[in-house]
Amino acid sequence: MLEDYFDLLPDHTQLPCEDGSFVKNFQEHPQSILLTESIRPILDQLHPERDYCIGQDSGIYWHLTHPPEKGA
């Protein structure tokens, strides 16, 4: 069932927070560049004035909502 799926996801007590830092590795910077350069043409098309911000090296915390429409 869908409810069982939600129980498998980590909650706030299981996220990395002991020292406030994120894991760093040598692939992080090239991955950020690849993701940024991949999305930039689309953002330029949607926002020709370049009124947007691209964040790199950021942690994103999220959760699934039930029903999914509550997260929209």
Image (cartoon, helix red, strand yellow):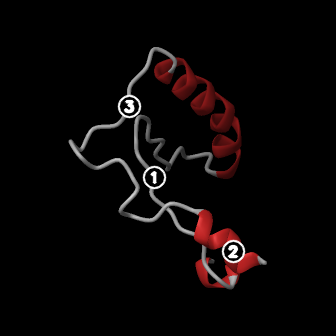
The secondary structure type at the circle numbered 2 is helix
Q: Answer with mark 3 or mark 2, whichever residue precedes in sequence.
A: 2
For badge 3, the amino acid type reads Val
Measuring 38% from the left and 25% from the top, which residue is drawn there? Answer: 24
Residue at the (50%, 62%) spot, across then down = 62
Quadrant of residue 37 in the image? top right
In the image shown, does 52 or 12 lie closer to the viewer? 12
Q: Residue at x 68, y 31 (%)?
A: 38
Q: Position of residue 34 (x, y in %)?
A: 62, 24
In this rendering, the answer to whether 69 lies above or below 37 is below
Q: Which residue is mark 2?
A: 4
Amino acid on which the number 1 mark rests in the picture? Ile
Q: Quadrant of the C terminus?
A: bottom right
Q: Residues within 10 Å of mark 1 (few under 14, many from 20)?
A: few
Task: From the top left corner, tell me how far across and down residue 1 is, in percent.
Answer: 78, 78
Disc 3 to disc 2, how far (Cα)?
A: 29 Å
Q: Nearer the viewer, residue 10 or 49?
A: 10
Secondary structure under the numbered disc 3 in the rendered image: loop
Residue density around tag 3, few if under 14, some if 14–19, many if 20 or more, within 10 Å: few
Determine the residue located farthest toward the top in the rendered image.
26
The residue to which callout 1 is attached is 60
Q: Kindly report the distance in space between the C-alpha atoms of the residues bearing marks 3 and 1.
A: 13 Å
- Residue with the most extreme right position: 1
For label 1, the SS is loop
Q: At x 57% / y 24%, what residue is drawn?
A: 31
Image coords of residue 42 (percent x, y): 70, 42
